[in-house]
Image: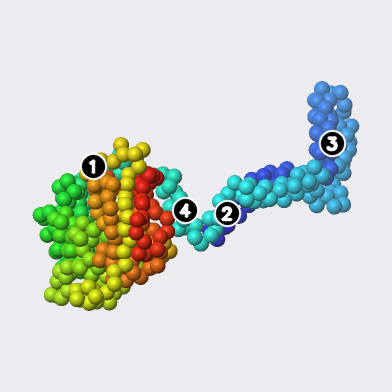
Amino acid sequence: MTFVLIAAAMVVAALAWVLVPLLRGARPAGMAREAANIAILRDQLAELDVDLANGAIPPPQYEQARRELEQRVLEDTKPAPGAGVVALSAAGAWTAAILAGALPMVALLLYLVLGNHDAFSPLASRTMPAAAGAKHDLTPQQVADMAARLAARLENEPDNPEGWVMLARTYYALNRHADAARAFERATMLVPDDAELLADYADALGAAQGGTLSGKPQALVQRALKIDPAQWKALALAGTAAFERKDYRQAVAYWERMKATVPPGSPIAQSIDSSIAEARALGGLKAGAVAAAPPTAMGKAPATPAAGATGRAAADPPTAAAAAALPRAAVSGTVKLAPALAAKAAPNDTVFIFARAAAGPKMPLAVLRKQVKDLPATFTLDDAMAMAPNMALSNFGEVVVGARISQSGNAAPQSGDLEGLSPTVKVGASGIDIVIDRALP
């Protein structure tokens, strides 16, 4: 509405600027003729004054001629019928009419062609700032300059926790992890009971230490979890710290708790599943073989959900005796590396051999870990290698068996990994030949 009012006012101003001079230039009909006659009579009266002064005419004749001239002046200046009505010339009238109609229409057409009429949308105020930001992305140098100004300001405002948090996160974005850790330390001194802030501090300090969470970062993580046992970043870091010290059971326990805080089936849930699968494979953990979760701030351990597809807690796993009595489903075969790809793999690169459902979730049903130097290698995947009780081979009729070489040792597929897959086979099949013959894009 404000825009419409301003636009209308501008159109009115433009019309006034153009039309007022046109209207003001109009004259009553016959004015030009009367002005000419008066000028002539004035000249004649001046000639009479000269003749009288020169003695060319006597005074009586001068007076008579002067009265006649004055009478003519009165007659010529007498208003004619309708003379009080102002009449515009035809050209002036048409010009004013055309401009009055055309100017607003031209302005409207120009707006329709060149203007941003989507700005009238209620969503415009939300989308326009983002679009503007896309066109005016800050350069790293500009961000660094802003950080320097903020740091200078905080020297005069050392008790400003929001400023320290902003500065810390800006330093982190610039990969200045040591500076970020120092800023987070100041922030946590001002706000000591913020679990998220403590987790961010631990993350920055770990990055400043070369990527390890041992020592103070781990203590900060545990402090955060005492304040909020479900703080997702603290759980992620706690699991990573356990993974670093090869406590794979504890890593799975933390990551299971983390998974319970994210939407089931989301990309982050799938990423957590991959981390859990890697920890299980490295630790040789069977389904349900997870360490008890550490006690919370209240001294109780929260329920630890199993790594099912839905993220909900599964039923208790069977006892060892009961599990031994159950029939085990299995698939077996041989894994080879194609000669054409042999130069792209190092002897100590990790090889993950896995089986997954032919139709259903992509989470591995069983995983076996070897190295490239072990190839060609025979394998057997069975229910004992299940990632979760409800995700065992015996719960599916058909599977795809694959093998992937990972230079990073990460169980999640990455660009550059080498992989080979079998066709769909029935659970219980043996003699499956898998050739690692392609690189992942």
| Residue annotated with mark 2 | 117
N-term-proximal mark, 2 vs 1: 2
Residue nearest the observer in this picture, 275 or 66: 275
Residue nearest the observer in this picture, 253 or 402: 402
Left or right side of 365 for 291: left
Q: Which mark is residue 347?
A: 1
N-term-proximal mark, 4 vs 1: 4
Inspect the image, locate mark 4, and give the three-letter code of the amino acid beneath it. Answer: Met
Check whether the beta carbons of the residues at disc 3 and disc 4 lie within 8 A of each other. Answer: no
Quarter placement of the C terminus? top left
| Residue annotated with mark 4 | 128
Mark 2 is surrounded, within 10 Å at the Cα level, by few (under 14), some (14 to 19) or many (20 or more) other residues, namely few
Inspect the image, locate mark 2, and give the three-letter code of the amino acid beneath it. Answer: His
Task: Inspect this view and state whether residue 195 appears.
Answer: no
CA–CA distance in space, label 3 to label 1? 118 Å
Residue at x 20% of width, y 68% of height: 289
Q: Position of residue 413 (x, y in %)?
A: 33, 51
Mark 4 is surrounded, within 10 Å at the Cα level, by few (under 14), some (14 to 19) or many (20 or more) other residues, namely few
